Each structure stands twice: as structure tokens, then as C-alpha cells.
Image: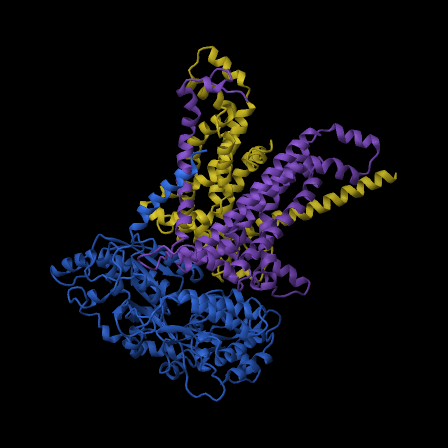
Chain colours: A purple, B blue, C yellow
């Protein structure tokens, strides 16, 4: 990458100070704004070591008590389980559905071209709003889905009211909103693939499945990784959909780490105790994202090499 | 990039500055509050006048409820009368207290006034969110001479008076809010359906469950016997559930060695919970766990449910011309008790309005409080806007109101039979939200079959409740 | 002959599956808009054929402060995007053109903001904002929204900058133009489509934000996403109004999305994939 607006002389260290500092200066406003947001992160660590509660008027340092207590709470492990289940269910479904629909859409036709534009609509709608829409549709009194199920003799399907079907309902809403994201990404990937290897494979007479497995899939990997990274990171911390749907219920069925942190901190006012939950969530996301991004960079190199 | 260690030290020291500033005025309940003194000074000049805060603007947070609808109707009159500008917001009950807690916690002074119940006072007064009303009530320049505070049922007014000592009953201490109305608990039912099936209102829970067995899909697909609250919220525990809980002889907490100990896994509680879960499974809606009082009442009104075990006023809101499909068919009976029991225990809930401790407009807020709990307003709202049960004797004695009550079959009789046994059945403590929300969540989990037995679920709940109230020490 | 039948049947299967998905994706939106025009009395008894009415719209838009929430959303979202553009475009340029120490680290840090759990940021910010007096203010929300809008903007615009050949700049410099002229007169027009797309996409994400306005504002400012909570599941009688709330909140972004659909992929993937 060459430098612009300065001499293309690439010996950076020889530049006069002002020129060297220029990139940093240009980035300073951006940095200031973002550092202003980094501050809460360190605050969170600090307060997680106290017994700060919105109810009390003073607080004191309690060391690692909140942390050790959290690790002993069954709630915590349950929240991790829910977080994992939700992320796997939603991301998994979205990846599979996304891949499938993208493949179907890769064929050029008037229909597919129209559909490619129309399918972004659910993605643009705020998850909270999507939850309202689905609650309306599944409403036992007036919902269109209820009326549809009635045709099959199914009445009063509980959707989000039953512990057995709550996760399904939340996943359904999540998939409805976010599957288009995966579709668009993979579709872009499909459209950017070079034609020659495929033509060669056709001449060689390989089956469609074989071509898919050995050519398409590997070349699609970078795109699939991006989709996976974004969706996984987001679904691990999903808050809006679950909050709007059941606030974590029924019982504790949907109490993932985000909702648990919110409930402990804002509803029960136990600020210090809630922070370890969300900090753990951050840690999980950080570790997973680093691993996946590293993988993605690797995959990008090899896919390009092909 | 930057020296991480240096940065951490720098940041921690900045944090240290933040941390030293703890929140001021620990236990001061506001008698010497600057804004209260200001209010007193203004009132001193010329004594009580309705327009002594003219030109001030206040913000009011209301819960979505017929009481709130009544208030909203009269706000234009209030504004004209006092010159105070009112900016209000309504939130549905499911999210209402989340919003109030966060707003009060932000200590910005907004809202100036908010609707609250008795239990929430335990939470909010302890956290210093509410302004004590004593300095206002006791000052003859601030209290409207026509207010007639003794017209308010002492039992109801007393539920909003508390000395902030956990375990101490309500009735002593500061007055934290003024009541808009109150409710007790009873069984509302569809008399046409009962006639059709040849049924009488049940006297015991066991009879109730039997009736539910008879009334399966009584009106075809989609209908079910009894509407009950079930959402993951304190609201699910306090109506019929808590009343029945007491009727089975159970209690939530006991004081032992200066600490609060949860008794929620006692044999009485287990028996009661088992019966209640049976009731839900046999008679409740399939979507029970998402039901707040709105849905429960609406189902009775729509004819989807044949019974409603909830606040007497919940059924009342479904009556009146055109209020709902089954409006004229709704009748009331005393709540079903446990086997062999004679004495009725009903919980009591009151919706009241309170003042934010951090408010900057206390004089105007106080005028709002007086106006909307006054005798005239109470009468109007009870007659015209269904704001029952009124907290003032004068309203109950009013002939027009009596006529209105007579229109609702069994309502007045049930009220009279139940009122003597009506009081707050919870043990006052400041972690009320946490303990009762967890209680509702546990109930949901038990119904969903998460535990091998009701005892197991309640044992786990007891542990959670004990932990929540751990920090309370009772002298 | 066989191949032809195979091809047509494959085509039929493909189109059927796609139609099923299209139904899944689009029918809810269609139905929701449909019932905004249905009166409450007809809600239980009719499905698709009924007498349309504007009553629900009147109730929600004129008799409640939902419209104010709508305006609040516009103010906060556009404000956030504006700030991101003003601050982010130069930053994107620096990342695209300059080589300096810690560049990729910095870039990744900015990107990682997108992954940070919102709830982690909010809990401490709640207190900080109170202390600073910016709780429940436009300023406070616009600042925290940068977490959503700025990473997106920087990464996408960076990609567009990188697409521009350096020689264009160098040529202009040789011609004696000062750096700000080059920037404003030559570079900006070239990235304009990408900038507009990224800006609109950032606007949509900011618009959809729920957690931040839920907890960092509440009385003076209520965004449409938070206000819509009032219509969730509690109001069992006014379904049409619920639908209006959802429609009013969703439609603007659907329209905006149509405008930027060409640049969507690049924006959504933060520039990692070309549109």
C-alpha cells in the first residue's frame, strides 16, 4: 500500500515529525471518541470488584467475591448454556439456510434478480420490531399463523409461552431477520468466483456435487467465515429479541448472559454483581472472535492462492 | 501499542476519583431538603392556594391502567386550575417498574411523580428514591384544608406508611405515597356458563379444580376454564396466588436471629403450590406463562375463559356498557379457600402516586398528588371512569356509586365479606422485586416440568430468596 | 430429452424453494401492513377481506407521542451518522493511505467495537453519563451510537479509498493543488457512492438500536424501538395499533435499503467483500 498525499518515498522513518504524526493526528478525533467508550470497559472491571448497588449509598471494595460467587451460581452456568444454545441454533440455522438460498439465487433469472433485492427487507427491520410482528402473527386470538395452524387442527400453539417452544420461537425470529445477511454475503462470494475453474470442471465431466465440494465450497470459505464471525458474535450477546419476547422466561429458559446481566444490574439494582456476567460474556466473544478472525485470514490466503 | 501498564494505572486512579464520591444524604428522608424548604416558604406566603406553583412544568410516569386513563382525562382541568403544565408517559405494566427503577436510579429528578404500589415503596424508600410526604401533610399551608385525609381508609393509607425497617409491618413511619384506589382478591366468573353447566361458585380450591375439569373447552376450541396471571414478574405472585398461599397457612419469611429466613419451601407452601400448579395445568390457558393481568381479564371479557381468579377490579373493568363481549354475564364470589378453612385471607394491593426524592418541582408535584387523590376526583373517577375500588369512605357511601356497584352481581357482597381479612400478606423488605420475580420464574419452571418435584423447585427458591435478603439485619 | 426434463424439474424445484423462502421472508411484512388498516372489531372475524380504515393510524400517530419517538429516532440516528462521517472519513483515509506503527491493530480495535456486548458498555456508561450529566440527552446517545456507526463507516470507506489509484492524488499534487483541495474536490466525489451507502447503512443500524436508548435515555428521549415496547403483547385489544407501531418503525428503513441495495454487501461485511 503506498502512501498518498505525501511523497511516494516509502522510507517512513526519515520523514519530518509533523508528517510522521499526520496519520495519528487525522485519527485522533476518531480515537478520542472511541477511547471515551473504552473507559466504561475499565470501569466495569473496577466495579466488578466492589459491592456497588444502586440501592445503597456507599460501597466498598470486595475483591473477587462477586466473581467467585458467580462461578458457584447455577444461574451462571445455565446462562452460559443458554447463550451457547441460542448462538448455535441461530447461527447454525442461518448458515445452512443462507448457503442453500444463496446457491439457489446464484442462477441468473428475472425471478432471482428480483428476489435478491426483496430479501433484504427483514434484515433492515429492527429485531425488536420483528419480535412485535411475529408476536402479532402467532397471537392465539387474531394471528395469521394461529389461523393457519387451525386448518391443521392445531389450536393455541404456545410459541413463546412454553419452555419447550420458547427457544424455537426466538430462533425463528432471529433467523427471519438475519438469514438475509448470510445469503447476501455468500451470494456476493458466489458471484465473485472466477469462471475458469468451473468451466474446466464441466469439461472434465465431474458431477455437480463433486464440483461443489472441491471447488465452490473452498473458494467460498472466506465469505462463509465472515458471515459466521458476524453472526456468531452477535447471537452470543443477543438482548433485544429475548427481552422483547419474554424477558428471559418462561422460567429461565432464555436467560442468556446478556439478559442475566441486565436483570441483576438494572432490575435488581445489584450493579457490582452483574458485571462479572457481562465481562465473562465479553471474554468469550473476544476469544472466539480472535480465533475465527485468524482462521479467516488464513482461509483468505489459501482461497486466493487457488 | 501504548504502555499497557501505565495506562491501567492511570485509568484506575481516575476511577479512584470517581469512586470516592459516594451518593449523598444516606438516610435523610427530605425534611430539610432544599426543595422541600422552598416549597414551604412559598406556601407560607398566603397559605394554601391551588395556583401557588403556577407556571411550573412537571413530568409524570403512569402505568397502563384504568386509573391512569382517569388521570389523563382530568389533566387538562388540573392544568387550567393550577397553571401547572403536565407532561405524562404511559408504560405497560410488564415494563413499567423497570422503567421507574431506571429513571429513579438516574437521579435526574425525572419523573417528578410516578405511580407505585405498596411493595415497591419498600424498595424505593430504602434506596432513597421517594420523598416522604410528612413535611407536606403536616404543614397546614401545604395541605389543602378540604383534603380530608381521614376520609381515606386508614387500612389502605397505612399500607403506604413504613418505617423502612425490614420485617416491620406497614402502618408506622413516614407516609410515602397517596392511594388512587385499591383491590382485593376474589373469583370472578361467567354466570351464564355456570348456569349452563349447573355449577355453583367453588368454596375450596379442590372444588375449583373439579369445576375446571368440567369446563374443559366449554365454548369450543380455544376456550379454557380459568384465567390466571403467569408472566415472569412479581405481578404473577401477589394476586390470587399469594392470597391462597396465606389461606394454606404458609408465609414468605420469618424473622430468626435478626435475619430474614424464607419459608417458601415449608410443607404448607409445597401443598399449596402443588394444588396451584394442578389448577394451571388443568384449567389454565396454554399461554399462561405470558399472561399479565390485561390478558387474563380480557379473556374473561371475551368469553375465552369462564373464570378469573385475580383482583376484583380486574373483572370489574370488563363490565359496563360495551366494555367486553361478556360484560353483563360477569359475577363475583368469595375466593375459594383451602379445605376446612373458615377465615378468609386476601392480599391487598394499592396503586398510589409518589414523589421523586430528586424532583426539582416538589411544590407542583405535591399539588398534583393532592388533586388526584382528593375526594371530588375520587368520586368522579369511580363513577365515570371505573376507578375502583375507591380508597375513600365518602365514595363508598355515595348513593350513585352504590347503584353502580349493585349492577355488578356479587361484587359488593364479595367485597364486604373479604375486606376484613384483607391486608398485605408479604413481609416488607427492600429486595421485594428480586424475591418475587424469582418466585414467578420458579413457578414457571415448575409448571414447565423442570424439577423432579415441587419440593425441589421450592428448596432452590428458598436458597435464592435467603441469598437475596442476606444483607438485611433486623435489630 | 432426459437432460431437458432434468433441467426443467431442477428449475421447478429451485423456484418452488425460493418461493417458499420469499413467502417466509416477505409475508409477515405484508400481513403486518395489511392489518394496520383493519379495525379492531373485524380483527377476530376476518382474515384477508375486510373494510379498510385509517383509524389505527390516527390513534397512534395523532393521539400518542409515538410520532415524537419517530422524530427522536431521526435526530439521534442522523446525528450519529453525521459525527461518524466527519470523524470517520479522515480516519478511513489515514488507514488506507498511510503506513504507520500499529495500524492494523488500531483498525482491528475499531472493528472489535462492533463485537463488544452492548450490555457490557451500558452498565458502566449508565453511571458515567449521570455523573457527566449527559444521561437522557441527544448528545449522550449520539456519542454512544458511535460504537455502532463509526466502525462500519471507517471500514467501508477505507475500502473505497483503497480502490482509488494513488496516482490520481499524486498527479493532482504535482499540479500544485493543496492537500485539502485534493481531498475535497477529487477524492470525495470518487468515494461518494460508497460514502452515501455506508452512511445510509449506518443510519439503519443506528435506527434499529434498542439496548442503548432503552437504558441510556428514557424520558426526554424515547426512540421508536423503545416506544414500540408499549405495544408488545400487553395491549390485547388494539392489534391494529400494534401493527401501525411496527410499520411506522420499519418502513423508512425498508425504503432506505432499496436506495442502497447495490452497495449493501460491501457495507454489511464491513468492506471485506466487494459489492
Is residue A117 in view from this perspective? no
Q: Is residue B70 left or right of residue C187?
A: left
Q: Quadrant of residue B183?
A: bottom left
Q: Quadrant of residue B466?
A: bottom left
Q: On screen, A166 above or below C173?
A: below
Q: On screen, A247 above or below A305?
A: below
Residue that lies at the very extreme toward the top in this rendered image: C175
**Image quadrant in which the C terminus of chain B is located:** bottom left
Q: Is residue B89 left or right of residue A133?
A: left
Give the percent coordinates (x, y) of residue B80: 24, 57
Taking depth in this image into account, of C29 and C73 the one nearest to the observer is C73
Taking depth in this image into account, of A138 and A90 the one nearest to the observer is A90
Give the percent coordinates (x, y) of residue A159: 59, 61
Give the percent coordinates (x, y) of residue B306: 53, 75
Is residue C105 in view from this perspective? yes
Taking depth in this image into account, of C63 and B414 the one nearest to the observer is B414
Residue that lies at the very extreme toward the left in this rendered image: B46
Taking depth in this image into account, of C9 and A209 the one nearest to the observer is A209
Q: Is residue C25 left or right of residue C147?
A: right
Give the percent coordinates (x, y) of residue B122: 34, 67
In the image, what residue occupies the spot 62% across and 37% down?
Answer: A296
Residue that lies at the very extreme toward the right in this rendered image: C1
Q: Is residue B169 left or right of residue A123?
A: left
- Number of disc labels: 0
Q: On screen, A14 above or below C54?
A: above
In the image, what residue occupies the spot 54% across and 28% down?
Answer: C159
Amino acid at each position: 500500500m503506498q502512501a498518498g498525499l505525501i511523497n511516494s518515498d516509502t522510507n517512513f522513518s526519515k520523514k519530518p515529525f509533523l508528517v510522521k504524526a499526520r496519520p495519528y493526528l487525522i485519527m485522533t478525533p476518531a480515537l478520542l471518541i472511541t477511547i471515551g467508550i473504552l473507559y466504561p470497559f475499565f470501569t466495569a472491571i473496577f466495579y466488578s470488584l466492589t459491592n456497588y448497588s444502586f440501592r445503597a449509598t456507599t460501597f466498598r471494595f470486595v475483591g473477587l467475591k462477586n466473581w467467585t460467587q458467580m462461578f458457584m451460581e447455577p444461574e451462571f452456568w445455565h446462562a452460559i448454556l443458554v447463550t451457547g444454545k441460542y448462538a448455535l441454533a441461530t447461527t447454525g440455522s442461518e448458515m445452512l439456510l443462507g448457503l442453500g438460498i444463496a446457491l439457489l439465487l446464484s442462477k441468473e433469472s428475472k425471478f432471482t434478480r428480483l428476489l435478491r433485492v426483496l430479501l433484504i427487507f427483514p434484515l433492515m427491520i429492527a429485531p425488536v420490531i420483528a419480535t412485535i410482528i411475529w408476536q402479532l402473527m402467532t397471537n392465539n386470538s387474531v394471528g395469521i399463523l394461529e389461523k393457519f395452524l387451525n386448518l391443521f387442527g392445531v389450536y393455541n400453539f404456545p410459541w413463546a409461552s412454553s419452555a419447550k417452544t420458547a427457544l424455537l420461537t426466538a430462533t425463528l425470529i432471529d433467523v427471519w431477520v438475519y438469514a438475509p445477511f448470510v445469503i447476501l454475503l455468500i451470494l456476493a462470494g458466489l458471484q465473485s468466483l472466477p469462471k475458469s475453474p468451473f468451466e474446466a470442471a464441466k469439461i472434465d465431466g465431474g458431477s455437480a456435487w463433486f464440483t461443489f465440494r472441491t471447488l465452490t465450497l473452498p473458494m467460498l470459505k472466506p465469505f462463509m467465515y465472515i458471515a459466521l464471525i458476524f453472526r456468531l458474535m452477535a447471537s452470543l450477546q443477543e438482548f433485544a429479541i429475548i427481552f422483547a419476547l419474554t424477558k428471559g422466561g418462561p422460567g429461565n429458559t432464555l436467560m442468556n448472559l446478556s439478559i442475566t446481566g441486565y436483570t441483576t444490574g438494572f432490575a435488581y439494582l445489584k450493579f457490582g454483581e452483574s458485571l462479572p456476567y457481562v465481562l465473562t460474556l465479553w471474554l468469550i466473544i473476544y476469544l472466539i472472535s480472535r480465533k475465527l478472525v485468524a482462521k479467516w485470514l488464513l482461509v483468505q490466503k489459501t482461497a486466493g492462492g487457488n | 501499542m501504548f504502555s499497557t501498564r501505565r495506562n491501567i494505572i492511570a485509568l484506575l486512579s481516575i476511577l479512584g476519583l470517581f469512586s470516592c464520591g459516594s451518593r449523598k444524604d444516606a438516610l435523610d428522608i427530605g425534611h430539610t431538603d432544599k426543595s422541600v424548604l422552598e416549597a414551604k416558604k412559598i406556601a407560607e406566603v398566603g397559605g394554601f392556594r391551588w395556583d401557588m406553583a403556577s407556571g411550573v412544568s412537571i413530568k409524570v410516569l403512569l402505568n397502563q391502567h384504568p386509573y391512569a386513563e382517569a388521570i389523563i382525562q382530568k389533566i387538562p382541568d388540573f392544568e387550567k386550575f393550577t397553571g401547572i403544565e403536565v407532561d405524562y408517559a404511559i408504560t405497560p405494566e410488564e415494563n413499567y417498574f423497570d422503567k421507574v427503577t431506571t429513571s429513579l436510579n438516574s437521579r435526574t429528578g425525572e419523573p417528578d411523580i410516578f405511580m407505585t404500589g405498596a411493595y415497591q415503596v419498600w424498595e424505593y424508600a430504602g434506596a432513597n428514591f421517594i420523598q416522604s410526604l410528612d413535611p407536606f401533610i403536616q404543614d397546614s399551608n401545604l395541605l389543602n384544608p378540604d383534603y380530608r385525609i381521614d376520609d381515606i381508609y386508614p387500612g389502605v393509607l397505612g399500607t403506604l406508611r413504613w418505617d423502612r425497617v425490614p420485617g416491620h409491618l406497614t402502618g408506622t413511619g413516614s407516609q410515602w405515597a397517596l392511594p388512587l384506589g385499591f383491590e382485593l382478591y376474589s373469583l370472578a366468573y361467567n354466570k351464564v356458563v355456570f348456569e349452563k353447566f349447573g355449577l355453583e361458585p367453588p368454596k375450596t380450591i379442590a372444588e375449583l379444580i373439579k369445576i375446571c375439569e368440567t369446563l374443559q373447552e366449554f365454548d369450543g376450541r380455544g376456550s379454557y376454564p380459568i384465567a390466571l396471571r403467569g408472566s415472569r414478574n412479581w405481578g404473577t405472585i401477589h394476586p390470587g396466588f399469594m392470597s391462597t398461599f396465606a389461606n394454606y397457612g404458609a408465609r414468605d419469611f420469618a424473622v430468626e436471629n435478626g435475619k430474614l429466613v424464607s419459608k417458601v419451601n415449608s410443607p404448607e407452601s409445597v401443598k399449596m403450590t402443588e394444588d396451584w400448579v394442578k389448577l394451571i395445568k388443568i384449567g389454565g390457558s396454554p399461554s399462561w406463562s405470558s399472561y399479565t393481568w390485561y390478558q387474563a381479564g380480557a379473556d374473561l371479557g371475551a368469553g375465552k375463559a369462564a373464570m378469573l381468579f385475580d383482583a376484583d377490579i380486574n373483572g370489574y373493568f370488563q363490565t359496563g356498557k360495551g366494555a367486553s363481549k361478556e360484560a353483563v354475564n360477569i359475577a363475583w364470589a368469595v375466593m375459594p379457600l383451602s379445605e376446612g378453612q373458615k377465615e378468609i385471607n386476601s392480599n391487598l394491593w394499592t396503586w398510589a402516586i409518589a414523589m421523586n426524592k430528586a424532583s426539582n418541582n416538589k411544590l407542583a408535584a405535591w399539588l398534583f398528588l393532592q388533586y388526584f387523590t382528593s375526594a371530588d376526583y375520587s368520586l368522579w373517577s369511580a363513577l365515570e371512569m371505573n376507578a375502583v375500588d375507591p380508597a375513600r369512605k365518602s365514595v363508598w357511601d355515595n348513593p350513585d356509586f352504590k347503584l353502580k356497584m349493585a349492577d355488578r352481581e356479587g361484587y359488593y357482597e364479595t367485597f364486604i365479606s373479604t375486606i376484613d381479612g384483607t391486608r398485605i400478606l408479604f413481609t416488607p423488605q427492600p429486595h421485594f422485586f428480586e424475591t418475587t420475580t424469582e418466585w414467578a420464574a420458579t413457578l414457571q419452571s415448575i409448571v414447565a416440568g423442570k424439577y423432579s418435584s415441587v419440593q425441589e423447585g421450592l428448596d432452590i427458591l428458598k436458597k435464592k430468596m435467603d441469598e437475596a435478603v442476606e444483607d438485611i439485619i433486623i435489630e | 430429452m432426459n437432460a431437458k426434463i432434468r433441467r426443467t424439474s431442477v428449475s421447478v424445484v429451485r423456484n418452488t424453494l425460493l418461493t417458499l423462502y420469499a413467502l417466509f421472508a416477505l409475508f409477515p411484512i405484508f400481513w403486518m401492513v395489511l392489518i394496520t388498516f383493519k379495525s379492531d372489531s373485524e380483527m377476530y372475524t376476518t382474515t384477508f377481506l375486510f373494510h379498510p380504515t385509517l383509524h389505527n393510524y390516527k390513534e397512534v400517530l395523532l393521539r400518542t407521542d409515538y410520532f415524537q419517538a419517530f422524530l427522536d429516532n431521526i435526530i439521534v440516528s442522523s446525528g450519529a451518522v453525521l459525527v461518524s462521517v466527519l470523524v470517520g472519513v479522515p480516519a478511513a483515509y489515514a488507514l488506507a493511505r498511510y503506513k504507520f506503527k500499529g495500524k492494523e491493530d488500531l483498525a482491528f480495535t475499531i472493528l472489535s467495537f462492533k463485537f463488544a456486548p452492548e450490555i457490557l458498555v451500558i452498565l458502566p456508561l449508565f453511571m458515567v453519563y449521570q455523573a457527566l450529566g449527559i444521561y437522557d440527552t441527544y448528545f449522550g446517545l449520539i456519542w454512544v451510537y458511535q460504537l455502532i456507526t463509526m466502525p462500519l463507516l471507517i471500514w467501508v470507506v477505507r475500502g473505497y479509498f483503497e480502490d482509488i489509484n494513488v496516482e490520481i492524488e499524486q498527479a493532482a499534487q504535482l499540479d500544485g493543488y493543496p492537500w485539502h483541495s485534493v481531498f475535497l474536490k477529487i477524492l470525495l466525489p470518487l468515494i461518494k457512492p460508497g460514502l452515501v451507502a455506508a452512511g445510509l447503512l449506518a443510519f439503519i443500524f443506528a435506527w434499529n438500536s434498542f439496548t442503548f436508548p432503552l437504558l441510556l435515555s428514557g424520558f426526554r428521549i424515547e426512540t421508536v424501538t423503545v416506544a414500540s415496547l408499549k405495544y408488545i403483547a400487553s395491549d390485547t385489544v388494539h392489534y391494529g395499533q400494534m401493527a401501525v407501531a411496527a410499520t411506522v418503525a420499519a418502513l423508512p428503513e425498508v425504503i432506505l435499503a432499496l436506495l442502497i441495495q447495490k452497495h449493501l454487501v460491501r457495507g454489511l461485511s464491513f468492506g471485506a467483500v466487494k459489492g
